[in-house]
Image (cartoon, rainbow, N blue to C red):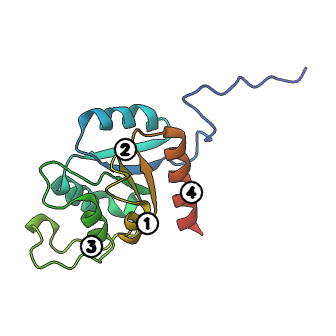
Amino acid sequence: MKPVNPPLSQSEGLRPSSAPRRSLLYVEDDPANRDVAQLRLQKGFDMVFAADDREACHLLREFGPTLHAVLMDIELQGSLLNGMELTQLIRGRLNTPRLPSYAADMPRIDVPVIFVTAYHDRYPRAELLLSGGDDVIYKPVDFVALHTAITRVILNRLG
């Protein structure tokens, strides 16, 4: 009799258990949005979160080379740099003499950035892509579309 493989549980998804998990940094100032993202993405990704530009710079320095993608909100309460400026900073393209000390000498990090924003009228897709983003997802977040975008930008970077 041929053995029957048990169906994959939802937590196992389609990823083989031996495959390495992908890591994401989500820069988001709203705790509720961070919580929802954690719940919806934790099955496929290891996640770290930054609530403002200071935390983002710290985590980018610490985890930058190991990140598979960054999810970037644009308007960050309490931050001196917005998400577009943070993206330009990690791309090595932000030229301003008045960077906050925690952002000075930020190493260039080659990681895909997906903007996640509610302000589709204020920040058109073309402007966000020109600022260094690889893709844009508008809030409320469609997590199937977000997961697809993450996979697409990671695969594009791999060649």
| Residue at the front extreme of this rendering | 121
Element at badge 3? Answer: loop
| Residue at the image point whose x is 22% and y is 44% from the top | 29
Q: Are marks 3 and 1 in contact (CB under 8 Å)?
A: no
Q: Earlier in the sequence, mark 3 or mark 1?
A: 3
Cα separation between marks 3 and 1: 26 Å
| Residue at the image point whose x is 19% and y is 56% from the top | 53
In the image, which disc is placed on residue 47? 2
Q: Are marks 2 and 4 in contact (CB under 8 Å)?
A: no
Q: Are marks 2 and 3 in contact (CB under 8 Å)?
A: no
Residue 60 x, y percent position in the rendering: 28, 60
Kind of residue at disc 4: Arg
Q: Residues within 10 Å of mark 4 (few under 14, many from 20)?
A: some
Residue 49 x, y percent position in the rendering: 28, 45
Above or below, 66 relative to 78: below
Left or right: 39, with 10 as reference point: left
Q: Residues within 10 Å of mark 1 (few under 14, many from 20)?
A: few
The quadrant of the rendering that contains the C terminus is bottom right
Q: Earlier in the sequence, mark 2 or mark 4?
A: 2
